[in-house]
Image: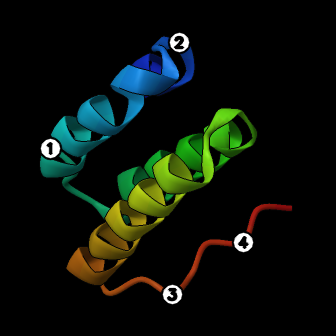
Amino acid sequence: MFEVLLTCTTEELYHNAEILAENLTSEEMAREYIIRLFQRAPELTEEQEKKLHQLGRKVRKKFGMKPVRID
C-alpha cells in the first residue's frame, strides 16, 4: 500500500500522501505511513518537508498518536 510513497517523484509525493492519509484505518497503518514519509525526507525541499510534516501531524492527531520514533 505504501510503496507508492517510496517510488513516486517528489512532486507527486504530497498528493499521494494526502490520498493515502484519508484511507488509513488503524494506528499501525498510520505508523507505517509516517515512517515511509520520513524515509523520503532527505530528497525534499524545505517547503515540501514542512507540508508533509504537517500532514503527518494530522494523521497522528486522527489516531491519538505520540510522535513516531525511527530507530
Instruction: Answer left or right for 25 relative to 3.
Output: left
Q: Is residue 6 above or below residue 68?
A: above
Would you name the residue on which mark 3 appears?
Answer: 66
* Mark 1 touches mark 2? (CB < 8 Å): no
Q: Which quadrant of the figure contains the N terminus? A: top left
* Mark 3 touches mark 4? (CB < 8 Å): no
User: Considering the numbered disc 1 on the image, is that residue within a helix, a strand or a loop?
Assistant: loop
Residue 56 in which image quadrant:
bottom left
The residue drawn where x is 57% and y is 81% is: 67
Q: Amino acid at mark 2?
A: Thr
Q: Crowdedness of circle 1 by 10 Å Cα count: few (<14), some, many (20+)?
A: few
Marks counted in the figure total 4
Q: CA distance from mark 2 to mark 3?
A: 27 Å
Q: CA distance from mark 1 to mark 3?
A: 20 Å
Would you name the residue on which mark 1 appears?
Answer: 23
Would you name the residue on which mark 2 appears?
Answer: 7
Q: Earlier in the sequence, mark 1 or mark 2?
A: 2
Q: Amino acid at mark 3?
A: Lys
Q: Earlier in the sequence, mark 1 or mark 3?
A: 1
User: Considering the numbered disc 3 on the image, is that residue within a helix, a strand or a loop?
Assistant: loop
Q: Earlier in the sequence, mark 1 or mark 4?
A: 1
Q: Crowdedness of circle 3 by 10 Å Cα count: few (<14), some, many (20+)?
A: few
The residue drawn where x is 43% and y is 55% is: 52
Say whether residue 64 is visible: yes
